[in-house]
Image (cartoon, helix red, strand yellow):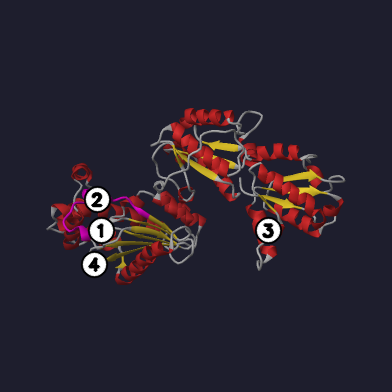
Amino acid sequence: MAHLFISYSRKDLDYASQLCEILRQHQLEAWMDREIPSGARWQDVLLDKIETCSAMVVVISPRSARSFWVMRELSYAHEFKKPIFPILMEGAAWPPLDEFQCSNTVEELLHGLRQLARLFISHTSADENFASRLATDLARLGADVWQEDDNHPEQDGLYSSQIMLLVVSASSMESAKVRAEWQAFHASNKPIIPLLVQHTAVPVTIREKQPYIDFLDQDYQLAFAQLYGLLRSLGVMLRDHEQVSVPPQPQLRLNRYEMLREARTEVWISGITLEGIARHFDVLENLVAHTPELDIRLLTIDLSVDLLNETGAWFGIHEEKFAGLLGTVSDEFVHWVDKHRGLTREGFWVGQRLFGSLQALAQLQQRLPNNLHIRAVPYRLGTGFLITDPHLPEGLLTGYPYSYRLDVAKGKQPTEYDLSPIFLSKRSSKENEIWWFDKYVQEFEALWEDATPFDWANI
C-alpha cells in the first residue's frame, strides 16, 4: 500500500514515534511530519502526504483532541476520502472520530491495516477461471482478497479494497463494468496492477500503470512470484513465498482511440488514409458531446490521380487485403474513377480506401460543423499520427514508424519491418523522447498551413 499518514499532537511525539517504528517493523510504510525536508513548505508537504496516503492513523489523546492541526489533517483526510484508523493512547474518542472503530492496542491496529491492503480482482466472467485460481493462491498466503456476494455488493469492495489486480484481456478491456471499477480506483489514487492474460489494446491510463505482470508469455508460477514481490513492496503482509523482480518489459498495446477520451482542447489526426477514425463516429461524437469546445483537425491528401498513384507506389499494396477490397468498391468511387482516368493498381488501392473514408467523414462534418475540420494537401504525406492536446503538458501522441522509416527503407515493402505504433506521453516520457513529440507537432502545423479546406461537394 502507499504510506500511512500518522496524525498526532506534538505533545505525544514519543508515542507517535514508537508507533511509526512498530508499523515499519511490520513492513508498513509510515510517515509523520518530523520527516519534512528542510526548506520545504510544510503545509504543502502535509497536504500532499495526506492526498497520496493509503490511510490516516490518528493518535487519540486529550492533547490531540485540542490540536488545531490534528483537526485540520482530519478534515483533509475526509476531503480526500481516506480511510481513518484511530488508535487510543489516552482518554476516549472524540467527534468526529467516535464514528470509527477505535483500536485499543497496536495489534488491533495492525489487524485493521491488514484489511486496508485488501485486494480487488477486476475481471469479467470470461476470465473467471484465472481470477479464481489467483484469488485462491493469494488467500493461501494470507492475502485479504475481496469477493462479491449478495451480502457484499461491488461498491463495498471498491470502497474497502486498496489495491486492484486488473485482469487485462479483450473481454475486460471492452467491459463497461471493469472500466468503471478501474476508473474508481484511479480517481482515488489507489494502486492498480495490470495482469496480462491476453494481448489486447488498453486505454492510456492502464498503459501507464507500471509495471504489469505478464501471465500470458510467462509460466504462471514465475509471474505469480513477480506479483508476490510487487505486493510485498506495496506493504501487503503475506506469508513467505518465492519472490522474483519484474524484468524489463514492453509496454502494453495502446488503443489509440482511447487517447481521444483524454483530450481537452485539440485532437490532430494525419494519415494517408483515415479509414480507422472514419469507423469510429461514436468516439468523436461522444467526445464533442463531453467537450463541446474541442477542435478536431483531420489532415489528408487531395483526391487527384497523380497524387494517388504516387502515394500508392510509395506505400505499397497489401495483396491479401487488396483482393478483398475489390469486392467492396462503392458505386460512387466507380463513378469517380470513370471521370478521372489513369489510376494505377497502387493508386486504386489507396484511392478507394481514402474515398470511402472522406465520404464518411464529410457526413460527420455536417453534424459537427463547429468542431470537425478537414484539410487536404497537394502532395504525398509522410506522416501518420494522432495527437491529443499538443500544446498542453498532458499531451499524448501515437505515431506510426512508416512516417519516418519508409523513405529511409528505399524500396522495401512495409511487411519487411515493424509497423507497430510508437506512443509518447508528455507526462511520462523522457526529455529526449519529447523531441519526437515536438517534431510531430511542428510538422503538422506546417502541413496544416499548406493545406486547403476539404470540400466533398466538389469531388
Q: Nearer the viewer, mark 4 or mark 1?
A: 1
Categorize mark 4 by other alpha carbons within 10 Å: few (<14), some (14-19), many (20+): some
Looking at marks 3 and 4 on the same chain, the residue that comes earlier in the sequence is marked by 3
Categorize mark 1 by other alpha carbons within 10 Å: few (<14), some (14-19), many (20+): some
Looking at marks 4 and 1 on the same chain, the residue that comes earlier in the sequence is marked by 4
Compute the Cα span from label 4 to label 2. Answer: 28 Å
For the N terminus, which image quadrant? Answer: top right
Q: Which residue is mark 4?
A: 378
Q: Are marks 2 and 1 in contact (CB under 8 Å)?
A: yes
Q: Position of residue 384 (x, y in %)?
A: 31, 58
Q: Position of residue 92 (x, y in %)?
A: 86, 44
Question: Is residue 380 shown to the viewer in this render?
Answer: yes
Q: Amino acid at mark 2?
A: Tyr
What residue range appears in magenta? 408-422
Q: Amino acid at mark 3?
A: Glu
Looking at marks 2 and 1 on the same chain, the residue that comes earlier in the sequence is marked by 1
- SS label for mark 1: helix
Q: Nearer the viewer, mark 2 or mark 3?
A: 3
Categorize mark 2 by other alpha carbons within 10 Å: few (<14), some (14-19), many (20+): few
Q: Position of residue 148 (x, y in %)?
A: 60, 31
User: What residue is drawn where x is 59% and y is 37%?
Assistant: 119
Q: Amino acid at mark 1?
A: Arg
Is 247 left or right of 43, judged from the image as shown? left
Q: Which residue is mark 2?
A: 417
Report which quarter residue 322 is drawn in: top left
Does residue 103 sit above or below 353 in this rendering?
above
The disc placed on residue 405 is 1
